[in-house]
Image (cartoon, rainbow, N blue to C red):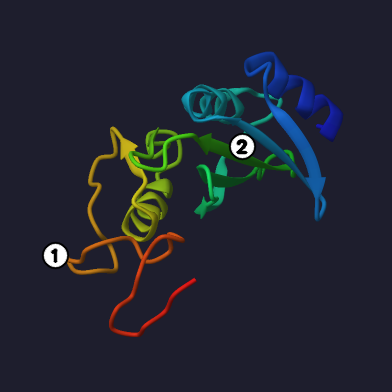
């Protein structure tokens, strides 16, 4: 599927999606509430078949959080990057995609552990790197590390 066709497919599911092309990847930014339905559609449709989630990460912006999903179709060979914008920095939440791609389970735990983003309906959302009693989320811009005195 060509990028223009993929763009039209995404717009048919999320009309307010915004697009940019960077590094050969088409990036589609969508509201976090629409991400799960779009992901499921792209995974299950015969003409897209995005069966491989190869990267999932978080980004901390001054006024919002973003979860970034890199997808590939091993059948068709095309790629897309989905970016889900989460408007709340105080209580960032988004639906899990681990029911669509099982590999998301560990990626989402990492993002939860380091950014504090809650993945609703996740089967085992708990810290993966840090101790359970760790306070804060080290990859957030507002995190203060008093031991190593790192300030931004």
Q: What separation in Å lies between label 1 and label 2 (alpha carbons)? A: 37 Å
**Residue 8 percent location from the top left of the image:** 78, 20
Q: How many residues crowd mark 2 within 10 Å: few (<14), some (14–19), many (20+)? A: many
Q: Say which mark, if any, is on residue 50.
A: 2
**Residue 142 percent location from the top left of the image:** 41, 60
Q: Which of 2 and 146 is in front in this view?
A: 146
Q: Nearer the viewer, residue 128 or 101?
A: 128
Q: Which of 28 and 93 is in front in this view?
A: 93
Secondary element at tag 2:
loop
Q: Is residue 60 above or below residue 7?
A: below
**Residue 112 percent location from the top left of the image:** 34, 52
Q: In this view, does 16 lie above or below 89?
A: above
Q: Is residue 68 above or below residue 10?
A: below
Quarter location, residue 151: bottom left
**Residue 12 percent location from the top left of the image:** 69, 14
Q: Is residue 86 above or below residue 117?
A: above
Which label sits in the foreground, 1 or 2? Answer: 1
**Pointer 1 or 2: first along the chain:** 2
Q: Say which mark, if any, is on residue 133.
A: 1
Q: How many residues crowd mark 1 within 10 Å: few (<14), some (14–19), many (20+)? A: few
Secondary element at tag 1:
loop
């Amino acid at each position: 599927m060509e990028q223009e066709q993929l763009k039209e497919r995404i717009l048919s599911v999320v009309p307010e999606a915004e697009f940019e092309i960077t590094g050969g990847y088409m990036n589609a930014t969508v509201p976090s509430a629409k991400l799960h339905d779009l992901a499921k559609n792209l995974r299950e449709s015969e003409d897209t078949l995005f069966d491989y989630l190869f990267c999932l990460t978080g980004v901390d912006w001054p006024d919002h959080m973003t979860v970034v999903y890199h997808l590939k179709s091993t059948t068709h060979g095309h790629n897309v990057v989905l970016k889900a914008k989460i408007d709340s920095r105080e209580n960032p939440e988004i639906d899990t995609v681990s029911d669509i791609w099982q590999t998301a389970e560990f990626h989402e735990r990492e993002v939860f552990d380091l950014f504090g983003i809650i993945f609703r309906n996740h089967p085992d959302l708990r810290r993966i790197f840090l101790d359970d009693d760790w306070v804060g989320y080290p990859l957030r811009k507002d995190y203060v590390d008093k031991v190593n005195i790192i300030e931004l």
